[in-house]
Image: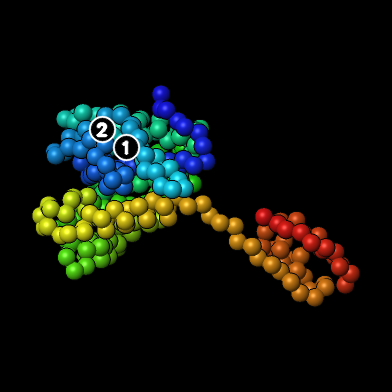
Amino acid sequence: MINLSTGESIRNIVVAGETGVGKSSFINLVTGTDRAAIANDVRGVTRGTECHDWVTDTQTYRLWDTPGLSEGSYGTVSPKQAQDALRSLLTELVRGDGVHLLVICMRGLPRVTKGMKQTYDTILRIRDKIAPDVPIVAVVTDLEKRSAAADIVPSMEEWWTNNALSLSEFNMGFSAHACITTLPDDCHPRIPGRQAQCQGVVRHLIVKGVSPKLACNIVIAGEIGVGKSSLVNLLLGAERALVGNDVSPVTASTSYL
């Protein structure tokens, strides 16, 4: 049973993807810790769902690590078990605090592969059945070899520019993305400040991704009888504003959602 803590300050971020793409390393980068276990081979180390908190002054972001979705028969978790784990996690979160963001991690290979597409489709099918309104963002990892000392983040962002057409052709849509490396600065190639910049990018991605949509107030004014209420009804697609048939005013003051 997943331990859910109810409260408006909790924002649940579910991290999913193929085995070995760096989901746990991504979570460690966001939280600034080494609490999520990582592996050095293609076998996954996350057998169940685990959560790790990133706490700011005003918000708690709870990142949920999930088993890799493509380990195959040689892995520690079968594809069916991994899918069931993701499905169960989303279901329980929806019943509790809700799911606020779904992060799909992908390795920054030279091109988009059919494996990436299959993993994306699997995650999308599960999300659409349980929490269809949850936004999906992409985090592309392992881009340290693309990073340049003079232009760290933009140099890694070139991966997205080069593969945007392929992602579109595969119908892989995301509301936002980040191209990063999770490696520390002293890993090859050594670039001071790289990890801090990548941490800033992914934290911004999460904060922006889960921010609630703010209401937009629109004031409609004009002479009596020019059709202000009719315009409101047209925008709403419903007859909610009272409409008059003469020049006498029918609206005192009101608001519509």
Residue type at numbered disc 1: Asp
Whether residue 77 is visible, yes or no, is yes
Quadrant showing the C terminus:
bottom right
Quadrant showing the N terminus:
top left
Answer yes or no: do the residues labelled 1 and 2 have beta carbons within 8 Å? yes
Whether residue 170 is visible, yes or no, is no
Quadrant hosting residue 127: top left
Q: Would you place residue 214 above or below residue 57 in this image? A: below
In screen coordinates, is 61 left or right of 30?
right
Quadrant hosting residue 166: bottom left
Name the disc covering residue 46, or none. Answer: 2
**Mark 1 or mark 2: which comes first in sequence?**
2
Residue type at numbered disc 2: Thr
Q: Residues within 10 Å of mark 1 (few under 14, many from 20)?
A: many
Q: Position of residue 39 (x, y in %)?
A: 17, 37
Query: Viewer-proximal residue, 25 or 113?
Result: 25
Q: Residues within 10 Å of mark 2 (few under 14, many from 20)?
A: many
Extreme residue toward the bottom, this view: 223
Q: Position of residue 214 (x, y in %)?
A: 56, 56
Q: Does dot 1 land on a helix, a strand or a loop?
A: strand
Extreme residue toward the front, this view: 57
Query: Viewer-proximal residue, 74 or 91?
Result: 91
Residue at 79%, 62% in the rendered image = 253
* Color theme of the render: rainbow
Q: Does dot 2 land on a helix, a strand or a loop?
A: loop
Residue at 12%, 53% in the rendered image = 186
Q: CA distance from mark 1 to mark 2?
A: 7 Å
Residue at 31%, 56% in the rendered image = 200
Please give the residue where the numbered disc 1 appears in the rendered image. Answer: 65
Residue at 42%, 28% in the rendered image = 3
Q: Position of residue 244 (x, y in %)?
A: 85, 65
Q: Position of residue 27 (x, y in %)?
A: 29, 43
